[in-house]
Image (cartoon, rainbow, N blue to C red):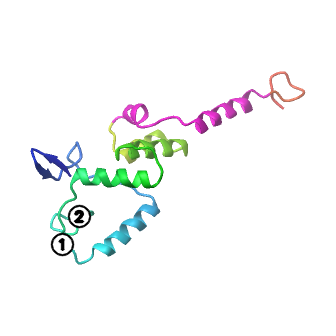
Amino acid sequence: MQRIGGELHQGTTKTGKARPVPLPLICLAALRWHRLRQAGKPDPAGLVFTTRTGRPVEPRNLNRSFSRLTATAGLRPIRLHDARHGCATLLTAAGVAPRVLMEILGHSQISMTMDVYTHVTQDTQREAINHMDRLLKRRPGRPDGHA
């Protein structure tokens, strides 16, 4: 949903195709709970999140709500879109293959996923260096490190 020329418009993906978005179970549970709370309320546009009267949520209001939630949680101010970057970073740190990450984020080029949406964490850097330590560690009795 975005405001263009003073009016709200329900858009599609950049390619115009519908794309399923895989979600963790914790998110699915929250969405199911939300659906139960919304039961019986007007939903003319088929939206998941609406105002109390069933109208689309104003994008600026969503951003303000997100800002309040992050402040309440004691987080530094971030944009809602930054949560997408965080998701990519967490999945990368968890060892998710770049091609899988590309599909989850809906990118057509893997370079977009790796260059823009992932950030190397200090823990990931430390883990990489620990791998190097194990590879280079010499074992007693062999000059090349092999047992």
Mark identifier at residue 42: 1
Horizontal arrangement in the rendering, residue 104 relative to residue 51 (left or right) = right
**Residue lying furthest right in this view?**
141
Q: Which of the 4 quarters of the picture holds residue 32? A: bottom left
Query: Is the residue marked by circle 2 packed among few (<14), some (14-19), or many (20+) residues within 10 Å?
Result: some
110 in the magenta segment? yes
Q: Are marks 2 and 1 in contact (CB under 8 Å)?
A: yes
- State the residue position of label 2: 50
**Residue at 68% over, 29% down:** 132
Amino acid type, mark 2: Thr
Range of the magenta residues? 109-137
**Residue type, mark 1 in image:** Pro
Pick the quarter of the image with the C terminus.
Answer: top right
Q: Secondary structure at mark 1?
A: loop
SS class of the residue under badge 2? loop
Residue 20 in view, yes or no: no
Residue 145 at x, y = what percent?
A: 81, 26
Tell whether position 65 is magenta: no
> In this picture, is 16 found above or below 36?
above
The residue shown at (35%, 47%) is 80
